[in-house]
Amino acid sequence: MTARIVQGRYELRSRLGMGGMGTVWLAWDRTLRRSVALKEVVLAAYGEDMAVRRKRALREARAAAGIRHPAVVHIYDAFMDDGSPWIVMAYIEGASLDRRIERQILSEREIARVGRDVLAGLAAVHEAKVLHRDVKPANIIVDPKDQVFLVDFGIARISGEHGLTSTNMLLGTVEFMAPERIDGHAVGPASDLWSLGVTLFCALERYSPFRCDGPLETARAAAAGRLPRFRRPGPLADAIAGLLVTDPAGRMGAAELGERLDAILASVSRPPVVRGPICHLPGGHILGGPGPEGRRGSGQKNGRERERPLLERPRQEAAELLASTEPRAAGRLMDGMAGDPAAAAEVLALLPTSRAGRIADHMAPDLVAGLVRAMPLSRSASMLAHTDDRVAAAVLGALGVVPAAVRLVEAMTLRRACRVLEYVPPAVVAGLLSATSDGRADRLLGGLSRAVRDEIARLTGRA
């Protein structure tokens, strides 16, 4: 079967998704020799004038193409072909959030991490005077490195422009729509935050709170905003409830939501006491289970051995334990070494830096900062290179403007440094940039969002 070629350049390979506003294809760009996501915007034959809708689709694609943020998919091009608008986007290899929700129960912290990334992306979208208008789990992609991307701007609408969307058209997925959109009232950034709230509810509770048997019933349920009882109450559920307030004026704002999600990400559980057959150590021994002595009846001694904290174990044994434990649990074990960062650094030094970085993703930022102080610069920089951007940012924030933090920024690539500094408090960023000596300060500043640059200018008196 001959592949379909669009615009004489894009070879359609497979269909990635399909919705009410079009189809997204995996395509091969023959000119630049790369995979892209190609959205074919399908315009129904009824409703608004076809020329008006074509104009809106291309205009909104151009508006979205101007957004630069690590959590927002990059749009390369937009064009008309055979009467339909097409949008060319970066192809993100990964799984959508709805697929992840189907496959596994996500922890509160994992959901907060995704929510924090999407919120940061929405902040960039709203700063550009654009509304996404279709935030939902299917439009959030998580790549193999756990980086989060907000995708599909095919139905976005530039804020402040009127007359191009008829009042009786509902573009998007009804169960994720804010009540004000369903009721035909003015919409703004708060409408996207409502949709994010429904998305986070789905991730936490594993079902959609307003979905009913038909679209009309679903629209009525969403407009009423009667939230079901949470089966998993807690800080994240409280934040979601604050987003799902029907009156946009009383809805939780982006700043407060960011603070709440940050608090969840920074929260640390008490280090677990190792009991039962948790994992296998070299030599066939089972950590937390009865060893040979236990089987011979020395249960009291073996019980004390099972409960021995990581800090009291020989360094090599502790490293072997961490190497054979899932990163999240290993991070909790490392948090038990908070009182002796030098010893913790010695243990992590016995692990590959990639493994140490994945463990650091699940540790308290203050402890990781202590490890950085206790490690040689090359080792700490290598470890942070394998951590999540927000974790690296939290570590820099905990360190403050000190030589070690400056050297860590200088050790990062320009792109990585810009991503990380986006999450660091602007006052700390200003101090770090002024202290750098590698000649990249202006380029780093230029790579940050306008909101961060403006705050730095205000703090440094250059506004």
Image (spheres, rainbow, N blue to C red):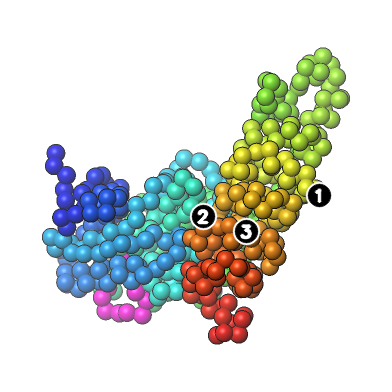
Residue 68 x %, y %: 42, 66
Q: Quadrant of the C terminus?
A: bottom right
Q: Position of residue 385 (x, y in %)?
A: 57, 51
> Depth-wise, is mark 2 or mark 3 nearer the camera?
3
Residue located beneath label 1 in the image: 339
For the point 78% across and 17% down, the residue is 292
Q: Which mark is residue 408?
A: 3
Label located before the other in sequence (2 or 3) = 2
Query: Which residue lies at the image location 26% right of the left edge and 79% below the top edge?
Result: 163
Q: Is residue 134 visible?
A: yes
Q: Considering the numbered disc 3 on the image, is that residue within a helix, a strand or a loop?
A: helix
Q: Give the residue pinned by disc 2.
A: 114
Relative to 346, say whether 179 is above or below: below
Tell me which amino acid carries mark 2. Val
* Sequence order check, earlier mark of 1 and 2: 2
Secondary structure at numbered mark 2 = helix
Task: Write the start and end of the magenta stretch as one range.
Answer: 155-165
Q: Residue at x 30, y 79 (%)?
A: 162
* 368 sits to left or right of 138: right
Residue 160 forms part of the magenta stretch:
yes
**Marks 1,2: beta carbons within 8 A:** no
